[in-house]
Amino acid sequence: MYYTPLYLWLAGLLGAVTGASDFDTIVIARLVTLAATVAVACLIYLCCTGLRVRPLPALMAALLFFTPTSIFSQWSFVARSDMLALVFGLGAITCLVWKPASWGPALAGGL
């Protein structure tokens, strides 16, 4: 699987805006991955509630994303672009769940 350079551009842009050194830019890249991991959990919650799941089970589904230690320890805070790619993919699915007939398919296609 190939990834776009969006992750590197985002980390570099945030590093340039904050005036970070090279080491600090690596920390920023890891924070981008951590933020993307939290965004995935939020999108799982939104997707579940869009499918008319009650809030407590939807919250449990979102929190289950954090439970496998292999996922959290290997992918959540290491500077990798996988979580950002997952945010875009799950964001597209969430758009289709919430607005299947109006603007959802157009936004999902853009993501």
Image (cartoon, helix red, strand yellow):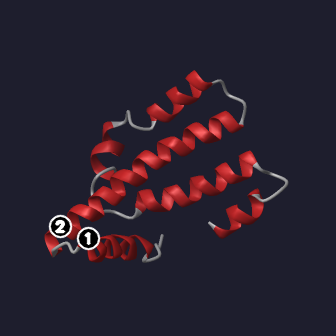
- Horizontal side of 46 relative to 81 (left or right) equals right
29 lies above or below 67: below
Numbered badge on residue 18: 1
Residue 27 higher or lower than 62, as above or below: below
> Does residue 50 lie above or below 10 as drawn?
above
| SS for dot 2 | helix
83 left or right, relative to 80: right
Q: Position of residue 106 (x, y in %)?
A: 75, 65
- Give percent across and percent down for residue 8: 36, 74
The residue labelled by disc 2 is 24
- Please, what is the three-letter code of the amino acid marked with disc 2? Asp
Looking at the image, is mark 1 or mark 2 nearer the viewer? 1
Within-10-Å neighbours for mark 1: few <14, some 14–19, many 20+: few
**Farthest right residue in view:** 101
Residue 44 at x, y = what percent?
56, 41
Q: Where's the C terminus, which quadrant?
A: bottom right
**Nearer-N-terminus badge (1/2):** 1
Q: Amino acid at mark 1?
A: Thr
Q: Quadrant of residue 78?
A: bottom left
Question: Residue at position x 35%, y 59% from top?
Answer: 32
The reply to whether dot 1 and dot 2 touch (C-beta < 8 Å) is yes
